[in-house]
Amino acid sequence: MDAIEKAIRNALEKGNAEDRAFRERVYRSAFAALDRALQANPGVTVEMAIKRRKSIQATITEIESEFLPAVPDVGLEVDAPAAEPAPVAAPAIEIGDKSPSPAAVVDSPAQPASDAPRSRVLPVVPDIMPDATLPGAPAIDMSAPATSGAATEVAPDRDERRIRGRRLPLTAIFLTVTVLAAVGIGLFFAMQTGVFKTAAQLDTAPPEAPPTVEDDDFTPADGANAPAKPGSADQSRDWINVFSPTDPTHVAAPSDAKAEVMKDDSGPFLRIQSGASGSAVAFDVGQGVLEKLAGKHAVFDILARAEDGKDTQISVDCNFGELGDCGRKRYAVGQQRNEYLFDVKFPDKRPGSAGTIAINSDFDKQGKAVDIYEIRVSIEP
């Protein structure tokens, strides 16, 4: 069975194939599909188009012959030899022919019984109009060449008038509007929360002069921006103590964070561990210290190390009240004790209260701890 015959038979199976009117609609749909396929393929020559139309005509004639009623043979005289039936050509189908449908073809009027051949009825093929569009007939896709061997599929009705006449049900309209509204709300929320902003756009803190680390920047464990080696920041500086583990009373840890004074061969330290919420441990900066720093360029020094076997990344935030803040800093802290520096240019005004330096022991919220040996500050000359 070739592709064209298979497509037409599949279309007939979708309705009442015994209904002649239905079969005619299927045949018309087949020719209409062929015309669409030929128009969509400018490379098809006239000879190829004629050949494909004749192929469909032959296929329709063969299929239609299966629906003809049986015709009894004409009686013959006893002992009279049976004459061979005269050959009759199958009726041709002209595309676009608007003449009445041809009737069934019968060989010839009945002859005397002694020499009359048996009657043979040929199938009646309806007048096929390629441009006709009849409702109720399955559309047939003739986009693939008839000789390609690929199965021709039954395609949905592409009549533009039908498409324009259809209306979406209220449920589909409601769902469409709801989805569009949800998408719009989501985009608005994302824009308000800064999802589409770059890190530079999200950084609203004032710029800081070198050698400070820019807000929320990562400081590697080595290289040009590596933390200072122990004691390297001591030269020619007068340090003001901000925190010492010998006096942990000026440390505030939230309910899900921990702060514990410990000691080993490296000396006393305060081991802090931020909670699962990422809450930081706050270290007080006394008002008297801030009064000394007002109007000055100050350098802060945090002496710290990571817990054994657990390198971490810490973040540092400051709140100096009326003197401003230090922006957010982020450092990679290893297992060796090191100094982590940042500087702040303070405005020339009187601080109204004390300030704080908040340290998050694990920027990635994995529960890692960090040991704080000391926090101190000095004034740049």
Image (tube, helix red, strand yellow):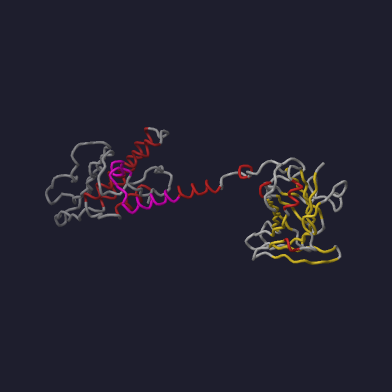
The magenta stretch spans residue 177? yes
Task: Please say if 69 is above or below 261.
Answer: above
Query: What is the quadrant of the C terminus in the image?
Result: top right
Residue 92 visible in the shown view: no
The percent coordinates of residue 58 (x first, y second) are 31, 44
Direction right: furthest residue: 235
259 displayed left or right of 5: right
Q: Residue at x 15, y 57 (%)?
A: 78
46 displayed left or right of 287: left
The percent coordinates of residue 318 (x first, y second) are 69, 51
**In front of the other: 320 or 282:** 320
Q: Residue at x 85, y 63 (%)?
A: 267
Q: Which residues are magenta?
A: 158-182
Most common secondary structure along the magenta stretch: helix
The percent coordinates of residue 328 (x first, y second) are 68, 49
Locate residue 37: give its quadrant. top left
Q: Residue at x 64, y 63 (%)?
A: 276
